[in-house]
Image (cartoon, rainbow, N blue to C red):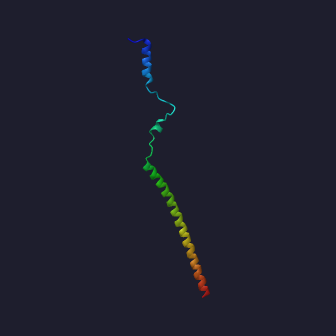
Amino acid sequence: MTTLEYNDWWVRRINDNIPKPSHENSQSIEEHLRVVPSELEIIKQDFERKNAKLEKKIEQMEEEKGELEIRRGCSETRGRKIKKRKN
């Protein structure tokens, strides 16, 4: 036979073992369900970013090359005209 105090203690002890939700570090459902990208996806995104930068550099260099070719062509024609005048 148990006492009333013991029964009260026993009920509280059992209920004390049930974990209660902590609101200190709680996350919203959206944050909890957010998909974390894998390492491979992160590497792929980084590669695509770097690739885009390199493509822009290539375009700029091609434009500069075209401008230099035009300048060289102009210089060559000037040189030919000067030679013709001298002759």
Of the pair 71 and 49, the residue shown nearer to us: 49
Question: Number of numbered discs present?
Answer: 0
Q: Position of residue 8 (x, y in %)?
A: 44, 15
Of the pair 19 and 33, the residue shown nearer to us: 19
Q: Position of residue 48 (x, y in %)?
A: 47, 55
The vertical placement of 63 against 39, above or below, is: below
Q: Residue at x 46, y 36 (%)?
A: 29
Q: Residue at x 61, y 85 (%)?
A: 85
Q: Residue at x 54, y 72 (%)?
A: 69
Residue 36, image quadrant: top left
- Image check: 5 left or right of 79? left
Q: Quadrant of the C terminus?
A: bottom right
The vertical placement of 33 against 56, above or below, is: above
Q: Residue furthest bottom?
A: 87
Q: Position of residue 9 (x, y in %)?
A: 44, 17
Q: Residue furthest left?
A: 1
Of the pair 55 and 23, the residue shown nearer to us: 23
The vertical placement of 57 against 46, above or below, is: below
- Image check: 54 left or right of 75? left
Of the pair 6 and 60, the residue shown nearer to us: 6
The vertical placement of 75 against 16, above or below, is: below
- Image check: 8 left or right of 66? left
Q: Position of residue 49 (x, y in %)?
A: 49, 54
Q: Quadrant of the N terminus?
A: top left
Q: Residue at x 56, y 69 (%)?
A: 67
